[in-house]
Amino acid sequence: MTSRVLVADIKKCTGCKQCELACSIKQTGVINPSKSCIQIIDWNHKGIFLPVFCQQCEDAPCMMACPKEAIYRDTNLERMVIDYDLCVACRMCASACPFGAMGFDQVRAKILKCDL
């Protein structure tokens, strides 16, 4: 099966942050970039924009850090998934992410991670 994960071409990113808005609507139903699983960083304020999102790591430090085994690899889509029924929102996964790609929704007490 073909892998279905998010890929970004940083050469084409203009920093418009439309992806942040679309993600926040999809994930939470509201337009709020702080609730997006994608963050756009302006590298050293030089107009070089870096989209930061889950890289679906092969070794998955987030999965290894989870004390409840709530993160697993969906083998059909080749991506990391959070089972929110098992997740206790301890944020250990977010601390372990080498890309800083996991966030936390304070209102819903829920880890935010790109599911693409």
Image (cartoon, helix red, strand yellow):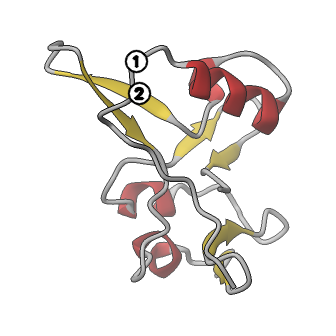
Mark 2 and mark 1 in contact? Answer it, CB < 8 Å.
yes
The numbered mark at residue 40 is 2
Instruction: Give, as a three-letter code, the residue at label 2.
Output: Ile
Q: Quadrant of the C terminus?
A: bottom right
- Counting residues from the start of the chain, the first of labels 2 and 1 encountered is 1
| Residue name at image x 49 percent, y 63 percent | 93
In the displayed structure, does residue 12 sit left or right of residue 24?
left
Looking at the image, which is closer to me, 13 or 34?
A: 13
Instruction: Give, as a three-letter code, the residue at label 1.
Output: Gly
SS type, badge 2? strand
Where 48 falls versus 7 (above or below)? above
Please state the horizontal and vertical placement of residue 58, each as a whole percent of the image.
Answer: 42, 81
Looking at the image, which is closer to me, 9 or 87?
A: 9
| Residue name at image x 77 percent, y 69 percent | 83
The numbered mark at residue 72 is none
Please state the horizontal and vertical placement of residue 31, each as a whole percent of the image.
Answer: 74, 16
Where 40 falls versus 97 (above or below)? above
Q: Quadrant of the N terminus?
A: bottom right
In the displayed structure, does residue 92 sit left or right of residue 76?
left
Q: CA distance from mark 2 to mark 1?
A: 7 Å
* Quarter occupied by residue 49: top left
Instruction: Provide the residue designation for mark 1.
Output: 15
Please state the horizontal and vertical placement of residue 79, each as a whole percent of the image.
Answer: 61, 71
Please state the horizontal and vertical placement of residue 100, each as a whole percent of the image.
Answer: 37, 47
